[in-house]
Amino acid sequence: MQLKSITDYLESVAPLKYQESYDNSGLLVGEKSLDITGVLISLDCTEEIVLEAINEKCNLIIAHHPIVFGGMKRFNNANYVQRTIQKAIKNDIAIYAIHTNLDNVFTNGVNARIAERLGLINTRILRSKSNSLLKLATYCPSDNCDAILDALFAAGAGHIGNYSNCSFSSSGIGTFKPLAGSNPAIGSVGNQSSEEEVKIEVVVPYHLQNQVINQLLSTHPYEEVAYEWYPILNSNQFVGAGIVGDFPNPISEIDFLDLLKKTMELEVVKYTPITKNIQRVSICGGSGQFLIEDAKHSNSDAYVTSDIKYHDFFDAEKQLMICDIGHYESEKYTIDLLYDILREKFSTFAILKTRIDTNPVKYFQ
Ligand SMILES: [Zn+2]
């Protein structure tokens, strides 16, 4: 199995276009033509993880966190990043990072997995991503309208909230004048013509633009297909940061903390108390300070995340129980998530979860 088949599949689940601007998700080390013998999944990619991959005969490491974020100017093994990269290159091991793009997808995302563990229902994205939707308009004879719509829907166009196959069609008159080089069957060169046509409009997620246009061009009967892409400002309900959901019934603060500790297998929870029961919960795996206000606006009773600073806890204003469960602890089930995503599709090579705890933070009790 070529590396490209695996990365193409992962990018269909978590498109690279959905990663944050500071991120560096994607193929970091290796060539797409590499034949993959085994995959090792980890949260972080360290020297120990590369060593584990060598020992397990895995030549692809899929890690949530990118080992490289910024530009590297020297390769002299002076720090763990350089040593990790060099060890991987010397041993023909590819490294792929699937970070904020996996955080930002609703289906199969990092936060959905945490919400599922906690037993939340009615889950939805906490801060949906804007600038990730387009509108496609195209024009065709009415006889071809259904076939074109079917092709566009099959390529992923027309999905709004809990509804698929959404479109708008209107009738009108299209005009054209064939020029030299045009198909003689369409009309005489220089003759103004007109045709009754249907205008079709559909929304398209940004990352599906190429496959939607390919479907349109292969289904449309015209030699020259007229179409327009429009960027739209609507947020994509299925892409964005954090998740919010509800417990079927409210539970006490202490029961919530107990549940959190058990289901996330935590040694400790750092939190700021409130005096109300917990029903609505916001979640952001990894560093989540940036979503405190969104959690408050969603009327959440609790916010589960990590890397909260002392002063950020004051932002809870006694309305929100902010629970800092630790960065590694909040994301460790991403290893299971990636395993399940890959297992569903591939069975011809070994897929292993790391046995190494890469958490650099320990608790002394
Ligand atoms: Zn993280």
Image: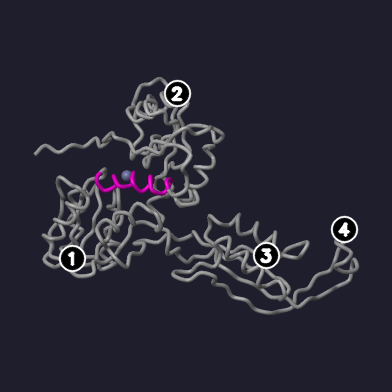
Compute the Cα span from label 1 to label 3. 50 Å
Crowding at dot 4, Cα within 10 Å, few <14 / some 14-19 / many 20+, comes out as few
Asked if the residue at label 4 sits under 8 Å from ligand 1, the reply is no
Identified at 46% across, 35% down, the residue is 28
Q: Counting residues from the N terminus, which is met first, the one under dot 4 or under dot 1?
A: 4
Asked if the residue at label 2 sits under 8 Å from ligand 1, the reply is no
Compute the Cα span from label 4 to label 2. 56 Å
User: Residue 181: which disc?
Assistant: 4
**Count of marks, rendered view:** 4
Q: Most extreme residue toward the left, as rendered?
A: 365
Q: Position of residue 357 (x, y in %)?
A: 26, 36
Q: Nearer the viewer, mark 4 or mark 1?
A: 1
Q: Counting residues from the N terminus, which is met first, the one under dot 3 or under dot 2?
A: 2
- Magenta span dominant secondary structure: helix
| Mark 1, residue position | 278
Q: Counting residues from the N terminus, which is met first, the one under dot 1 or under dot 3?
A: 3
The three-letter code of the residue at mark 2 reads Asn
Quadrant, the C terminus:
top left
286 relative to 79, above or below? below
Compute the Cα span from label 3 to label 4. 21 Å
Compute the Cα span from label 3 to label 2. 49 Å
| Mark 3, residue position | 227
Q: Residue 340 in magenta?
A: yes
Identified at 55% across, 61% down, the residue is 156
Q: Most extreme residue toward the top, as rendered?
A: 76
Of the four image quadrants, the one with ligand 1 is: top left
Crowding at dot 2, Cα within 10 Å, few <14 / some 14-19 / many 20+, comes out as few
Q: Nearer the viewer, mark 1 or mark 3?
A: 1
Q: Give the residues in magenta.
A: 329-343
| Mark 2, residue position | 91
